[in-house]
Image (cartoon, rainbow, N blue to C red):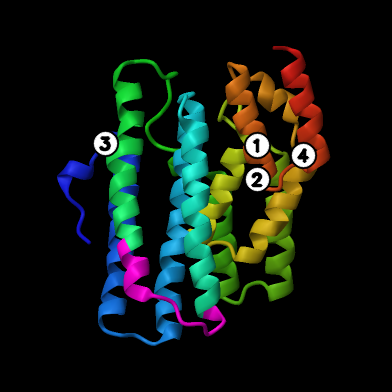
Amino acid sequence: MKWKKRYEIDVPFIDQQHCEWFKRVDQLGRAIEKGKASVEMATALKFVVEYTQKHFIDEQAYMQEIQYPGAASQHKLHKSFEKYIVDVLTNLKRGKDVPAQQLFQFMTDWMKEHILKEDAQIAAFVSQGRGTDASQTPAQNSPDDPLKEKLDELAAMRASDLITEEDFASKKSDMLGNFAAGPCSAAGADSIFKLQKLKTYIADGLLAEADLDVGRQALACNVNVGKELGRLNGNKARMMHLKTLLDEKIINTEQFESHKAEILSQM
């Protein structure tokens, strides 16, 4: 599965991520062709799943930021695809047989069609000047990233045996708490952008999967849903953001229903 210029949608960071996405799926395809064992197949698929999740979070946040009207539909398509590949990965880890070639064909067909039909519409929306002024690079790619710098420094101190594992874990937990409680420059999507950053740090090896749960809990304790919704334009954008908060477990069902009722009452 090779990346081709015709898959570009002229949103630079999305094109870059799509290219990387293709490379990872191609690596999975090569593992399938060589008849790798289930354990090796699971490793290759896990590599794809992790990047897919990161890409979907980045793309969804960008669509929210530019207030793309098709974001809700895109979110459903993303969730459906993600569920499929996660379910396959779960079966592989449990030692179950999976139709490997069928899986690879489904993934390649879905990705190509999704990019050419769905993602291309994002580019059309932006090129028509209908989106809000939004950077074409997600917030986590900003060179000014204090948390990343602190995590890098902390990891270096641990690697040099200057601090203990207990010191490392304790300080990292403090950093995540401060990060969750601190300000965010992404208008209207503070919690989602922060969660997006944490997932990126996991992909970069700066955080472990367990740290995401700690960060999510800290975000849940500090989220100001009313403030985040108030920064968004339009009830559809607010409902979409509210649903994302629920899906990412930053708010619970009771909070979701309460804010949903408030949005509907204003219509």
Q: Nearer the viewer, mark 4 or mark 3?
A: 3
Give the magenta-colored segment's residue range: 93-105
- Mark sitting earlier along the chain (4/1): 4
Q: Nearer the viewer, mark 1 or mark 3?
A: 1
Q: Is residue 37 above or below residue 143?
A: below
Q: Amino acid at mark 3?
A: Ile
Residue density around tag 2, few if under 14, some if 14–19, many if 20 or more, within 10 Å: few
Numbered tag placed on residue 9 in the rendering? 3
Q: Residue at x 60, y 31 (%)?
A: 240
For label 3, the SS is loop
- Tell me, yes or no, whether the two marked residues, 2 and 1, touch with CB atoms within 8 Å: yes
Residue density around tag 1, few if under 14, some if 14–19, many if 20 or more, within 10 Å: some
Residue 263, position in %: x, y? 72, 20
Is 221 colored magenta in this rendering? no
Residue density around tag 3, few if under 14, some if 14–19, many if 20 or more, within 10 Å: some
Question: Badge 4 is on which residue?
Answer: 222
Question: Badge 1 is on which residue?
Answer: 243
Q: Nearer the viewer, residue 159 or 138?
A: 138
Q: Nearer the viewer, residue 17 or 150?
A: 17
Numbered tag placed on residue 247 in the rendering? 2
Q: CA distance from mark 2 to mark 4?
A: 17 Å
Residue 231, position in %: x, y? 63, 20
